[in-house]
Amino acid sequence: MTLAIMQPYFFPYIGYWQLINAVDTFVIYDNIQFSKNGWFHRNNILLNNKKTLFSIPLKKDSDYLDVKDRFLAETAKKQTKKIITQIENSYRKAPHFQKVFPIVKEIFLYENKNLFEYIYNSVIKLTDFLDIDTKIIISSTINIDHSLKSQTKVLALNKALGAVKYINPIGGTALYDYARFQQENIELKFLKSEIPEYKQFGDEFIPYLSIIDILMFNSKDEIKKMLNKFELV
């Protein structure tokens, strides 16, 4: 069994979906510390042909809490409606707007104010839409010592689930030791994503946007090809 483990991100870029699609089982962390500099509640879209950040407001709380213990602000619905309007105005002339916008709108308007549940719903909805059949497991449901940290915790999750291969995004190369994984009979690989170029509104291609942008400008068949545009090293 091939495994990947990641933080829960909201409408992440194509590399996140390439990773999910590349493995048999994907563990999504709910018991990981929230970071205000992370991508838990924000991402970039194309607005007036410029890379523009949107952010879902969160209830004020300790930054030391886990994602599952954070909540959307009471004003979040008002803000998400503004973001939805921005997306509608920005992408209404995109070729796949009519098919994609209702799904995007439904995800933004999800009623659960728990941050993890809100993000988890978005991941499930989009994997279903993209016909990705990878098994997705919430980290806290796995029987390990959840006080473990970093590589030790990742190894424990791999062993608990019976993984023989672990794939991590290429950005985490320095975090893991090939020899340590080999000792546990687990093959360690890193996914190097190829960021596909596609026609947007302007002449200059703007990469690393939310999956929303790719969904608006590409058919499902085209996106499925993009999901396989990576290298394992």
Image: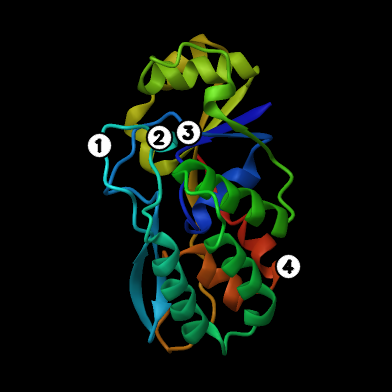
The label on residue 221 is: 4
Q: Is residue 63 above or below residue 210?
A: above
Q: Secondary structure at mark 4?
A: helix
Q: Secondary structure at mark 3?
A: loop
**Distance of label 1 from label 3 (alpha carbons):** 16 Å
Please tell me in which quadrant of the rendered image residue 1 appears.
top right
Residue picked out by circle 2: 69
**Distance of label 4 from label 1 (alpha carbons):** 43 Å
Q: Nearer the viewer, mark 1 or mark 3?
A: 1
Q: Are marks 4 and 1 in contact (CB under 8 Å)?
A: no
Across and down, in percent, residue 64 comes to 26, 32
Amino acid type, mark 3: Asp
Residue picked out by circle 3: 30
Across and down, in percent, residue 11 comes to 50, 58
Amino acid type, mark 1: Ser
* Neighbours of disc 4 within 10 Å: few (<14), some (14-19), many (20+): few
Q: Nearer the viewer, mark 4 or mark 2?
A: 2
What is the image's colouring?
rainbow
* Neighbours of disc 3 within 10 Å: few (<14), some (14-19), many (20+): many
Q: Secondary structure at mark 2?
A: helix
Residue drawn at the location 74% of the way across and 54% of the way down = 131
**Distance of label 4 from label 2 (alpha carbons):** 37 Å
